[in-house]
Amino acid sequence: MLRSYNINPLNNKDIDGVITLSNLLLGKDYLTPSLLQEYLANDNKIAFVVKAENQIIGFLLIQICDPKEVTSLALTEKEWFSNLFTNYPLGVIKTIAIHPNYKQQGIGTALSLIHI
């Protein structure tokens, strides 16, 4: 059982570890270094990494969207959705991934509950 882990924003030193984990879990080239650099350079893209024992064991990628963009993705209850969220930017989770050895320990839940 995992005793402790840290969740921090992605930084340049994390990119290779995130790519390695992504290749393992999501297939080769799902993520690229240049795509992860976009998360460091763009205010509308946010990434977090989870580390345990100095190893990356998970990550979260979020895209901040204009509510009008997201409304087109909400296939049901469009009116309800647009009435509630038109004045707020929304974050859409693009990817959340946890190494298989660390699943079922609440890490994914902790990542998804991060307040940005």
Image: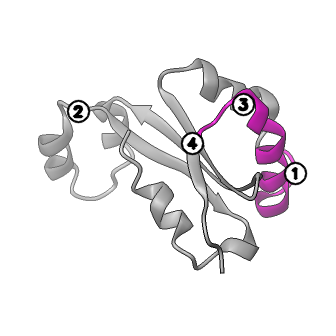
Looking at the rendered structure, the kind of residue marked 4 is Asn
- Residue closest to the eye, 76 or 98: 98
Q: Is residue 38 above or below residue 92?
A: above
Q: Specify the amino acid type for callout 3.
A: Leu
Mark 3 lies on residue: 35
Q: Is mark 2 on a helix, strand or loop?
A: loop
**Residue marked by disc 4:** 8
Q: Earlier in the sequence, mark 4 or mark 1?
A: 4
Front in this rendered view, residue 112 or 102: 102
Residue 2 screen position, x and y as percent: 65, 74
Query: Which quarter of the figure is the C terminus placed in?
Result: top left
Q: Where is residue 15 in the image (x, y as percent from the top left)?
A: 77, 36
- Residue hosting label 1: 28
Under circle 1, the secondary element is loop
Task: Give residue 100's position: percent from left, percent from top.
Answer: 74, 73
The N terminus - image quarter: bottom right
Task: Verify CB contact (< 8 Å) between mark 4 and mark 1.
Answer: no
